[in-house]
Amino acid sequence: MAAVLLCFLLAGPVLLAASSPVSGSNNGTVPLVLWHGMGDSCCNPLSMGAMKKMMEEEIPGIYVLSLMIGKNVVQDTENGFFMDVNQQVSLVCSQLAQDARLKGGFNAMGFSQGAQFLRAVAQRCPSPPMKTLISVGGQHQGVYGLPRCPGESSHICDAIRKALNSGAYSDMVQKHLVQAQYWHDPLNDDLYKKHSLFLADINQERAVNETYKKNLQLLEKFVMVKFLQDSVVDPVVSEWFGFLKTGQAKETETLQESLLYKEDRLGLAAMDKAGKLVFLATEGDHLQFTREWFNANLLPYLR
């Protein structure tokens, strides 16, 4: 992720800083929780560290929590590949519940896979309340391909690609490979629905969990950003909750064309009608955007 954010970093005078907490309890700002993407960490000075610093500059007094999954940045990065997603979500739910600065509610912004992980937090853990969820290149219907890996993790991604192609829904791969848990194979829909440990659950593929549906609809806004030249997410329509039509791997469908929406299994149709869903698109590859674009299009949802 660090490499693909260079465009963003070079677009404005972003100063780098450590991720020390900022007190913002009674200053009228809404706290912000960040969850990084694959191959990144909470505090990388070229990505999440810079994002945290920028938010503190743009919204003085804001409390920004950039999530670390593990005891240090090395573990945080590794866990983005190898730690069970459901366990990660559970740990984050506990961390948020114990943070007194979040008790009045918070906004959340997830980058790439961190976006669907934060959506799981919204669906499973309504306290403290998530107000607005911003998904920056998140894959809400999963992926069916790993064409290119971000940052300096290409060797890891080569091994991941082989594991996904050989047996994404085997117990061993599902339990030990994060990307397998949102691997969505349209040619093996029954296997996906039966064996996907994470995505099939939060997307109501096996059964409708009314609690998930109710909790997601508590969001004030659910903002989804799609990158029009994305070379990492396949298919890119997953960033807007669309996907490949079942039974083939060429033709895509939008969220509004899907059974998930038509049957409103997750409450997305109701949210759409209420004006809670926001679909944004920007030119560029995965997670590449300028500070000016961010300030014009995303910052208003965080003020």
Image (tube, rainbow, N blue to C red):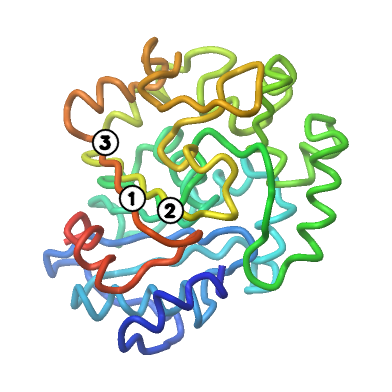
Q: Which residue is mark 3?
A: 277
- At a point 22% along the width and 35% down the height, the residue shown is 276
Please tell me whether residue 174 is drawn above or below residue 179 in the rendered image. above
Residue 13, how many percent across, how many down? Answer: 31, 89
- At a point 67% along the width and 36% down the height, the residue shown is 183
State which quadrant residue 217 falls in.
top left
Identify the amino acid type marked 1: Ala
Residue 83, how many percent across, how many down? Answer: 71, 51
Q: Which residue is mark 2?
A: 227
Please tell me whether residue 15 is drawn above or below residue 178 in the rendered image. below
Q: Which residue is mark 1?
A: 281
Identify the amino acid type marked 2: Phe
Describe the element under mark 1 as helix, strand or loop.
Answer: strand
In which quadrant will I find the C terminus? Answer: bottom left
N-terminal of the two: label 1 or label 2? Answer: 2
- At a point 64% along the width and 69% down the height, the residue shown is 71
- Front-most of residues 26 and 119: 119
Q: Residues within 10 Å of mark 3 (few under 14, many from 20)?
A: many
State which quadrant residue 254 falls in.
top left
Separation of disc 1 and disc 2 at Cα? 6 Å
Left/right placement of residue 69 relative to residue 31 reads right
**Would you say residue 97 is visible in this rendering?**
no
State which quadrant residue 75 falls in.
bottom right
Residue 94, how many percent across, how many down? Answer: 49, 49
Q: Residues within 10 Å of mark 2 (few under 14, many from 20)?
A: many
Please tell me whether residue 168 is drawn above or below residue 154 in the rendered image. above
Separation of disc 2 and disc 3 at Cα? 17 Å
Describe the element under mark 3 as helix, strand or loop.
Answer: strand
Question: Do residues under tags 1 and 2 come within 8 Å of each other at their CB atoms?
Answer: yes
- At a point 37% along the width and 74% down the height, the residue shown is 52
Left/right placement of residue 69 relative to residue 13 reads right
Left/right placement of residue 223 relative to residue 66 reads left
